[in-house]
Amino acid sequence: MSLISLSGNLLFVAFLAYLIATLFFGGAVKNSHDKREAAARHADKWGKIAIIITIIGFIANLGYFITRWMYTGHAPVSNMFEFTTAFGMFIVLAFIIMYFMYRATVLGLIALPIAVLIIGYAAMFPTDVSPLVPSLQSNWLTIHVLSAAFGQSILSISAVAGLVYLLKVVDLTKPSKERTALEAIMFFVVVVIGFVLVTLVFRGIGYEAQFTYMDKDEIQREITYDVPALFGMNESVALTEGKMKPLMDTPPIINAKKLTTVAWSLLVGSILYLLIRLLSRKRVSEMLKPFVKRANLELMDEIGYRSVLIGFPVFTLGALIFAMIWAQEAWGRYWGWDPKEVWALITWLFYAAFLHLRLSKGWEGRKSAWLALIGFAIMIFNLVVINLIIAGLHSYA
């Protein structure tokens, strides 16, 4: 078996382990015991099994990362598949660290599904190994990306704790802005599942449609769509007969192929969400609420704060300081207002404001939890929209 095949198998093992561990974490936090002592023993028993499976999955995930690094000769963070799988792996690592710090079993019920969705999202992108362009052949790139991804993963745990906090304290039986916002988060999760389904279905039937287009330098290029084109690249012309033509073309700065995938994901995700609502006759957030009824709110608030306190300096080093050093080496300037650079600065400013509001204004509990979720949304916007749709030096598009 080649290293690259072994790497793929290890990633699949990690994916399965995280799914199984999620079920055990669910069993640990939701039980039928009325007595507190019996419930605690039950949670401890199933929680130990869950964290052991999680660690096994993480070891397999790390094995994937190392074997792919050995095969490619560089850190596997140079394309969308590699970076996103690394991000998912680091979220699990951050969760394991927080678990042993606080023994908060309920975190696993949220953190692991997020990691599973992120790895599943990554698997939809090409897994091919290709040579690095000159600007990527730098040790500073490796240091920058790995530290930035790890910093983001620690910050993500604050959102996990925040979501647990809000699922417990928000009254889902009465109409409110908080209830609407929580359900919007659940809808987004279902949309990600929709993305995976769309990609699997059209990949399974072998759908392809080729177009020519004019890039921002007025050079004609070709592009192949893997799903029916809803949006076309600038001045697109169809080359494949019998395939759906774009409803409209987009400016050169927009990657219409990725925008089309996002649009299909929203469409399929919306249909899937409505089916869940019709079959369960409940909001998705209401389905999760029983799993967090035993969560310690003070502990969740503490974990959310500590995650930002630890993750913020790591993110500062990786996404700003190390990034500037690499930018100077690659492009001869420390800062260039590239879309990814701007969004990294926005993310940094947001978490700086988070800490300011927490320490100076006393924004704890509910307010802190909502800020943590907004911060995670900013990072996901960076991962999806900035990386894929907006063209730039950092863009994976």
Image: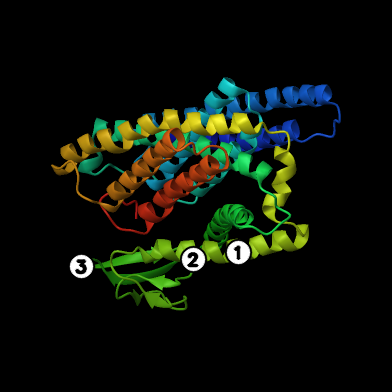
Q: Is residue 126 visible?
A: no
* Along the line of sight, the residue nearer the viewer: 127 or 295: 295
**Label 2 element class:** helix
Residue mark closest to the camera, 3 vs 2: 2
| Mark before the other along the chain sequence, 1 or 2 | 2
Q: Which residue is mark 2?
A: 263
Q: Residue at x 40, y 74 (%)?
A: 240
Residue mark closest to the camera, 1 vs 3: 1
**Label 1 element class:** helix
Question: Which corner quadrant of the image does residue 31 belong to?
Answer: top right
| Mark before the other along the chain sequence, 1 or 3 | 3
Q: Which residue is mark 3?
A: 219
Question: Which corner quadrant of the image does residue 75 belong to?
Answer: top left
**Residue 270: mark in rendering:** 1
Residue that extends furthest to the front in the rendered view of this protein: 361
Residue that extends furthest to the left in the rendered view of this protein: 332
Q: Residue at x 61, y 29 (%)?
A: 299
How far is the residue under mark 1 from the one under mark 2? 11 Å
Instruction: State the image coordinates of residue 335 (x, y, percent, origin top left).
Output: 19, 44
Direction from residue 360 to residue 98 in the image, left or right: right
Q: Residue at x 85, y 30 (%)?
A: 33
**Label 3 element class:** loop
Amino acid type, mark 1: Ser
How far is the residue under mark 1 from the one under mark 3? 37 Å
Mark 1 and mark 3 in contact? Answer it, CB < 8 Å: no
Instruction: State the image coordinates of residue 322 (x, y, percent, origin top left).
Output: 26, 33
Q: Is residue 114 above or below residue 61?
A: below
- Residue neighbourhood size for the residue with mark 1, other residues' Cα within 10 Å, grouped as few (<14), some (14–19), many (≥20): some
